[in-house]
Amino acid sequence: MAEITAAMVKALREATDAPMMDCKKALTESEGDMEKAKEWLRDRGMAQTAKKADRVAAEGLLGLKVADTFASASLVEINSETDFVAKNDGFIALVGNTAAHIFTTGVSTLEELNESSYETGTFSEYFTAQVARIGEKIVTRRFVTLNAGENGAVNGYVHSNGRVGVLVAAKCDSQKTAELMAPMLKNIAMHAAAMKPSVLSYKDFDASFVEAETIGRIEAIKTENEELARLKKPLKNVPQYISMSQLTPEVMAAAEEAIKAELAAEGKPEKIWANIIPGKLARFVDDNTTLDKELALLDQKYVMDDSLTVAEAVAKEAAKHGGTAEIVEFIKYEVGEGIEKQVTDFAAEVAAQMG
């Protein structure tokens, strides 16, 4: 049996960051062979990971990597079981390294990521080793890379808490405009992180979703108005519609006719109607597109200038540079969204273990 010295244990710990007693056991099991000991620790890490498989990892961080040329960008979500571990320096480094590796390799699936080469082995081996060091269930949940394409630019933003991140891609009239629009795209990503749109444009809403939302929102306003009436406060306007997708040419024509009838009833001279109708139609659209303003990125009021929509703000910025630009895609990740977290009865858990 080879003698296992303190220096050997110290060297293995520095190489793997595994606990001291595990390093000693690994060297003992491997008869002092450092490489075999490392492999033993990796295998043990895999076993520990397997034991943690039934736990729910709903905390974590997002990682972002953007090309210096703004030609592409990658966003990744890595989950941990606890928020405490998400603040661990080792975990933060793992997230950053994963984002950079995804960006560099261009992998598009988790299988490709795990099998890709990393340092002296596969990425899966590197990841497993890091999980063993950190000590709780950690998973790469999802990732995406956006490529700008010709005359395009991509930029991104991850909020300071690391839990909300957005990628934004734009198509421009020229490569010069695309390069100059990169800072604006980061601002749009920041806007999306704060305002949480779910679709790019009102055109992306599912018709059944709009229909259901229309009924629900109108009924909610009616109920609220009942309370306002009881309090003798001004009532809220009850819209007929909630999205531009509902404002067909027929609907707009009917709205214009209603405005004309209103002006006639007010005794306004017909010769000045042309000056009044556009403003009233704009108000009609504004009142009847609340869903778009809440959930469609391009139709939201831009947080840095609420006199403009996001689409208008992008067009205005591009015009300053002598070109044109439009947002063609955005992707928003929020850590843990859609994951059902376990609610643990700590007392019951302790009692079960003692029993």
Image: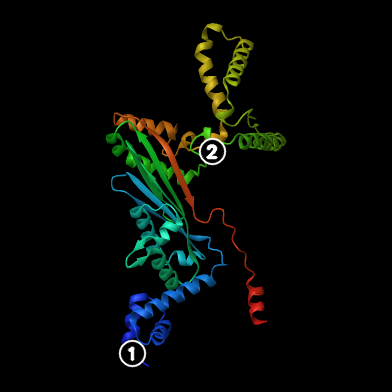
User: Can you give x and y, in whole percent of width and height, for residue 86 in the image?
Assistant: 45, 64
10 Å neighbourhood of mark 2: few (<14), some, or many (≥20)?
some
| Res. 312 mark | none
User: Can you give x and y, in whole percent of width and height, for residue 223 in the image?
Assistant: 70, 37
Mark 2 lies on a secondary structure that is helix
Q: Is residue 320 above or below residue 256?
A: below
Which amino acid type is marked by label 1? Answer: Thr
Pick the residue in front: 48 or 176. Answer: 48
Q: Residue at x 45, y 74 (%)?
A: 45
Q: Residue at x 50, y 74 (%)?
A: 48
Q: Nearer the viewer, mark 1 or mark 2?
A: 1
The answer to which quarter of the image holds residue 267 is top right
Which amino acid type is marked by label 2? Answer: Glu
Q: Which residue is mark 2?
A: 294
Q: Is residue 160 above or below residue 1?
A: above
* Residue 18 in view here: no
* Residue 278 in view here: yes
User: Can you give x and y, in whole percent of width and height, for residue 19 in the image?
Assistant: 42, 80
Pick the residue in front: 77 or 349. Answer: 77
Of the image marks 1 and 2, the number of the one nearer the N terminus:
1
Q: Which residue is mark 1?
A: 5
Left or right of 170: which side holds 339? right
Left or right of 264: which side holds 320? left
Left or right of 295: which side holds 235? right
User: Can you give x and y, in whole percent of width and height, for residue 319 in the image?
Assistant: 33, 29
Q: Residue at x 42, y 61 (%)?
A: 114
